[in-house]
Amino acid sequence: MRFAVSLLVVLAIASVIGTVLKQNEPYNNYRIEFGEFWFRQFEAFGLFDVYHSSWFLLILTFLVLSTSLCIWRHVPGMLREMRGFRERATLSSLQRISHHAETGKALDPAQITAHLQQHGYRWRTRDGAGFTLIAAKKGSYQKLGYFFAHAAIVVICIGGLMDGNLPLKLAETFGSKVPEMRDVPQSQIPAVSRLQSGNLSFRGDVFLAEGSSADVIFLNAGQGYFVQELPFLLKLKQFHIEHYSTGQPKRFASDIEVYDPSGKLLKSGTVEVNKPLIVDGVAIYQSSFGDGGSALQLRSWNLASGESSALAATSKSNQPLTVNGEQYRLELLDFRPFNIENMGRKTPADGSLQSAMAVAQSVKGEHNLKNMGPSIQFKLRDATGQAVEFQSYMLPWQDEGAWYQLSGMRREVSQPMGFLRIPLDKDMKPDTFMRLRTLLLDTKNHGEIARRTAEQAYRSGGVSSESREQFEQITQGVLAEFAKGGFPAIDDFLTSRVPEAQRQIVAQTYLKVLQGATQEALALVQQRAGQPVAQADAAQFRFNSDSLVAISNMFDFGSPVYLQLESFDEVKASGFQLTRSPGKNVVYLGSLLLVLGIFFMFYIRENRLWVRISPEGSILALTSNRRSSDLDREFELHRTALLPADPPSPEDGSNEKESA
Amino acid sequence: MSFAPASRTTLGKLDYGFAALIVLAAVFTFQRYGSFLDYYEQGILLGSAAGMIWLGWFWKPLRVFIPLCGLLALGGIALYDGELGNGASRFWLKYALSSQSAVMWMCVLFFLATLMYWLGLLGRSATALGVASGLTWAAAAAALISKLVRWYESYLLGADVGHIPVSNLYEVFILFCLITALMYLYYEGRYAARSMGAFVLLVISAAVAFIIWYTFDRQAHEIQPLIPALQSWWMKIHVPANFVGYGAFAMAAMLGVAWLLAEPAQQTTAQRRTLLLVAGGIAALAVALHLGSGQLGDVWQGRALFVAKFGYCAALLAIVAANRGKLAGHLPAPALLDEISYKAIAVGFLFFTIATILGAMWAADAWGGYWSWDPKETWALIVWLNYATWLHMRLIKGWRGATLAWWSVGGLFVTTFAFIGVNMFLSGLHSYGGL
């Protein structure tokens, strides 16, 4: 008993460990988090999978043994107890019961049994020497509660064991099964890492693109995995995703077909979250979704030449890419058909109590969600293995009236994306920007741009004829610095050449010069392209400034090409979890026993009542498995009904204290 | 407690009238909405009707409480007239019957009730305690009305958005207040022990304070559509069953505190001083953590505040430990507190067991297995093991008194961690209802 209760405490404490440390993560994550030394220690104690570790199973085994022992020891006695009426109780033993009352008279047995019947008691009558003893009882099933509740623990643990991976663990221990560590095609995985479809219980995952099928699933096993063969072939026809009007996901559903090994259709249907499909004792669950390798059309801008060309690719695949004679690998990651972003509240609260109350009064939230449209994430890896990650959106993005193309970039996976905003021209294309960029960065053009800028400045009266040549030189110098490295290069130039006191003024002048030169460069671009020259209005000024910022930022872009998503043909994928758990119904049976057991134990009170009648006097006694105020009340009830109203005896038990 | 109401008192006209009303309501609901319900939901409807009748027979005041709340909720629903915007323009909705107005009334009434219970306890005033009891009833009514009206409001947001309001932390906190208050009112009436309300209402007030913060700071009261994982009839039974458990455990813990203040202990002045010193120390640390939490960054700030609040509670408990028996003349007999506390844990344990089993069955439908050792599941197991041990100690070992009282107080800490702490500190499948 004491052992069993200690086990409950030990089990609770052991369980805590597994909730503090995230379980069953990829092992490398642990290695990074704890370092090699602690990783080894933790792994030795099975802390990354506490609930399947041998020591945890040992605790559970002890709990089952100890509970079984409790049942074994107590149940036979309890059954005897349940059947018995204790009609051998002696007068002195009845007098020792705290709830008893005596009277000097003899009582009528018929009246007593009628009363007992009315209150649901069963009784036996024994006639002794000069007395009659009526021994009654009620609620004997209370004792069954003990049996049910304790048997439930054993039954639940057995069910859990049936569904657990103990046989596989044992096979691993003896080396007859070894988890696969490599990332190789499923068909190449050796038999020692494969589990037959007859396996009693399993729980694994598989990820299928639309139109594809699988007859195996993967089971996580520490640092590796096992391949579990299925008794059927699972095919994903189509995956559906629906959204609420607010943009939150509403329904994930997969239309699937299941074929037997000979190719006969066994079952077809739709699997949804909360609505699994059960085939051949294997339950198929909707567990995740994603991109199944969509066909993408990209436009590739060569950042050195400014030329663009079409590029076909498939998401979730790799392809080589040659840019200006250099070899790269384009690693395409997930394609996402929509990107719903929370843009924050539209109207910030003004802080007054009234507006706060108004907000608190309304159950309708103010959602400011925005769909940023389709996007593709990819990595570009150079010959040395260095990779930069990018995210390219297909749709233009509007900010305060101007349109941009967004492109995210990061060098470390742990960093957030930094975004490049490329201003779009009137055709909503980056072409004008790209031409402007190529022109501005090519030093061959700087003379021409500087000449035009100086002329424009002279004509508008900005510079005198004497300083016109000097202005042209400065413009050319600023352009040269900008072409070297954007704004940071100009900044470096200022820091190294200009005294600190004048730096602010000079910087402003340079910026104005650069803006003027950009306007001229743009005119040159448009002339060469045979387009009408844009008016130098506010919108154009903004385009120019945005272009300068974007050109400057592109020095840090980390890629010789700019890839832009133009169109796609989506192929969705759906993740399934497949389980076979023969122990489930055993566990449910145990659960039912547990609830019944707890109910019986707490809500059925086992009462025993004796009335000993003799001509010298009679005694009424009542005991219960629970001593509570309810018992006091019930005793009062029987006493007033059964014993004639004579003054209560001094040792009347109704005012006794609870003993500790 | 006996589960056979008929054996104690025979059923009267009002009982049958109440039953007839519930049956009528159920039949009406079934006719009108039955075609929208699947078999399980139809079963839940029947079960709720039967359960409600039984509850009304078992505890008579509910025969008035349930129909009254239902009527007021229907009034609110009628005033909406199918248009959510009416909530801000029609007087009775704006100031009383819209779900959020009802929640605000609930908050005010629970605070007032707490105040009156304490006035009644300290001043030994039966009048004040009577008023407090009435206020608690009114607050519970406001809570139930808010739940019912909110359920309707969710459908006004969109036919596909509508769902029973037990789907996130905000909604279940109101459920917690409602269930704890009703359970308390039952025991208060049954044992004519009103002064213990001062303690039980404290824990409800703490929940109310959380609700207010959650509304004004986080706008958590806004109705959100259900994510696919929560779209299941299991939610209708798993969550309420859980909160009967949580409510009962919370009540038992507060009665444990009351017991400690009602039953004197042999303490020396030195022991008292040490305990007060400990209380001061813990409080100082908690204040430091509270004030310094701003520098810890977003994630850890919330966690530090949570720990600081644990610290305040611990300091208060140390003060309780230093003042054993100080309220002896004001509270019911310790034996009675002990008994009610035990009964609350027994009810809570039964419902918590059922809720955990229902949760496992839901998980078998949603996550691919009835048990995944997810942190929430595991902590439910820990809570269960804790009270299983408590009950063993009381029933088999015959423990009573201070140890069990302290243990039930500690149990509330474990329960609170399972309820809120897991969502804040640990990540897992059960990530709805995060803060």
Image (spheres, coloured by chain):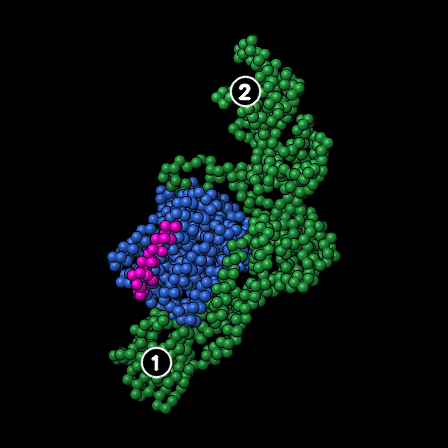
Mark 2 to mark 1 CA distance (whole Å): 108 Å
Please name the residue shown 73% across and 55% down the image.
Answer: A263
User: Which residue lies under the disc numbered 1?
Assistant: A96
Please name the residue shown 68% across and 58% down the image.
Answer: A178
Q: State whether residue A481 is above or below residue A10.
A: above
Amino acid type of the residue that numbered disc 2 sits on in the rendered structure: Tyr
B349 relative position to A451: left or right: left
For disc 1, the neighbor class at 10 Å (few under 14, some 14 to 19, many from 20) is few
Q: Image quadrant of residue A173?
A: bottom right
Pick the residue in front: B34 or B254.
B254
Please name the residue shown 47% across and 37% down the image.
Answer: A345
Q: Does the stretch in magenta take in B277? A: yes
Q: State whether residue A526 is above or below residue A413.
A: above
Q: Provide residue A152's location: percent of width, then percent of height.
A: 52, 68
Q: Colour of chain A?
A: green
Please name the residue shown 48% across and 50% down the image.
Answer: B424
Q: Provide residue A160's location: percent of width, then percent of height.
A: 58, 64
Q: Does the stretch in magenta take in B168? A: no
Q: Circle 1 marks a residue in which chain?
A: A
Amino acid type of the residue that numbered disc 1 sits on in the rendered structure: Arg
**Numbered mark located on residue A510 in the image:** 2
Pick the residue in front: A246 or A461.
A461
Q: Tell how many labels.
A: 2
Q: Where does the magenta region start and end?
A: B260-285
